[in-house]
Amino acid sequence: MTVFRMISKRFTRQAGAFRLASHLVTKCLVMGVASCLAVAQAEATTVKIHLNQIGFLPEANKVAVVPNTVGGEFWLVDAKTGRELLRGPLSQAQSWDVAGETVKIADFTAFNKPGHYKVKVAEVGESPEFYIQENIYDPLLAAAIKYYYYNRSGAPIEKEYAGQFARPAGHPDTIAYIHPSAASNQRPAGTVVASAKGWYDAGDYNKYVVNSGITTYTLLAALADFPRLFADVRLNIPESTNAVPDLLDEIMWNLDWFATMQDPHDGGVYHKLTDLAFSGDGMPHVQNSRRFLLQKSTAAALNYAAVMAYASVVLRDYEKHFPGRSAAYLQAAQVAWNWAKKNPKVLYIQPADVSTGTYAKADEDLQDEWLWAAVELFRASGKKTFLNDVKLPAKPRVPEWDAVETLGLYTLATYSKIPAKLQQDAKQLLIDMANRMVREYWASGYLVAMTEEDYRWGSNAVALNKAMVLLTANRVSPNKDYEPAARGLLDYVLGRNPTGYNFVTGFGYKSPKHPHHRLSQYDGVVPPVPGMLAGGPHSGWQDKCKYPSRLPAKSYLDDWCSYSTNEVAINWNAPLVYVLAALRE
Ligand code: 9MR
């Protein structure tokens, strides 16, 4: 793991590399995102050429997807003057079943001069405008993190930091009740417990341990893997003047809540803190339902153990700023693990009077949670016995809230103290996964490693978690295709997809305007909160909306009603943050 040093903010603020970007970021956060990007244009629906609507780094792969035209050429033109700058051949046509399309690729990777451009094809038309520029993703990266600030539970979101998105505090959660499903001798049903702070999960106002866990872990990994970058990323949040990276300040807001989800009497972890039912209309401060701590589960305990163990490792470098926290988190992780050992298969079962999200599946075997927690506890404590519990999976899955074994593989493959054979086997599993994704990348007309099975609830986060697998594989075993395939997935969520949307609010040519996000829906402000990744297309049709297409990659609707494709969620923004950090240069 990367060893990182504390660098004072005053010093790093002057560091050259991030200067232009910080300037853009500040403008973006103060004036509103729409005005900060020159690429923001009037929404149009007729564009047929799809590409990353934010733009490209000068040295990166650059492609646009063009319908299957009879012509064989494309032009790169200056966005303002229309002057032709490059003429290139379109590729052979290739199909992509999930989109029901046959398309050609315009590859202008060789063109690396910074500027403002469009791609043009005679029989088809023009692409949205885009930039080729250093630091092009920095405003997006800052906004993707700032989303967590807007989603804080128990904090007034102040004008100084939030502009038009300011709002009074809601859900203090200083009073939460032990639900009968969570009752114990020391904490019988109805006991009042304080469980303040944390982030709202998504479009709803509830807080769920397993989803909060994978989110926090991914953000901690971003901080730990790119410490120099995050020493410089400034978010204009209330803690911005202290001496730690703003990303860590934001993570601590959630960890403060996360810590309260452990029962101090036995070490077990409550599965969630929610209302009994999803709340109706309105901003957080008008909500007044009772909130409950729900049943303890083994998944929550192991997830909590993994995250707290990793947090204890990351916080070793911040002992001065958060004294005692690293040791306390390791202790909390160990105690949660002990509880799980005594209660190895307690699945969360939704009580009859509760209807908020379950974040649980009936057929869970929990092997993935055991692996992840054991690996993180080994890294945090150095105790070899934890490795006795590590059983490598036969076919590791792309990380998701209910599939966490690959998070364990990341550590097994990269941490220097893992025994050689185990490390080699873990690396090989990641390499096999990445190689499969590279095959998917080449096989898709859009050059995007997405297949039919990836189109489920939160498909955009599936794309970005796949990018994280590719990037980690590239770290442990460099391969010329891994980074382009990862970039292809980032390009995909930012516009190189058949819906014509860049899926991050407030950015690009066409982005979601009506996400299923109560804060954006009821704040009286026209644009949604910026920097949020919509869940993305899939043809499950798990709500009551009418979708434009049954094709998995096109079944998306920018409407409040579409909670299955147009909700936003903390676990979806986290891999966006990681991938943007990894691919920003
Ligand atoms: O992300 C979750 C997805 O994998 C499930 O299929 C879906 C239905 O159970 O729930 C999603 O999570 C939602 C959670 O239950 C409540 N808050 C909003 C989450 C995102 O839609």
Image: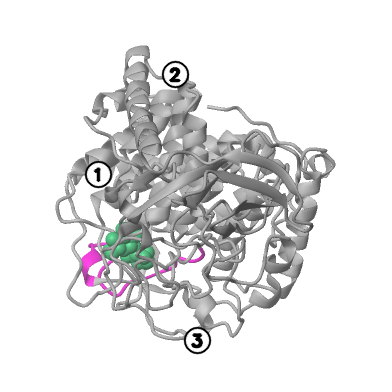
Residue 340 picture quarter? top left
Q: Is residue 308 above or below residue 34?
A: above
Q: CA distance from mark 2 to mark 3?
A: 51 Å
Q: Which residue is mark 2?
A: 417
Dot 2, crowdedness within 10 Å: few (<14), some or many (≥20)?
A: few
Q: Is residue 173 left or right of residue 181?
A: right
Q: Which residue is mark 1?
A: 340
Q: CA distance from mark 3 to mark 1?
A: 38 Å
Q: Which residue is mark 3?
A: 286
Residue at image x 70%, y 62%? Answer: 238
Q: Is residue 515 left or right of residue 145?
A: left
Classify mark 2: helix, strand or loop: loop
Q: Can residue 270 be seen by looking at this rendering?
A: no
Q: Are marks 1 and 2 in contact (CB under 8 Å)?
A: no
Q: Amino acid at mark 2?
A: Lys
Q: Amino acid at mark 3?
A: Val
Q: Amino acid at mark 1?
A: Ala
Whether the magenta-drawn stretch holds residue 192 is answered as: yes
What span is in magenta?
A: 180-197
Q: Position of residue 175 (x, y in %)?
A: 43, 74
Residue at image x 18%, y 62%? Answer: 349
Residue 212 picture quarter? bottom left
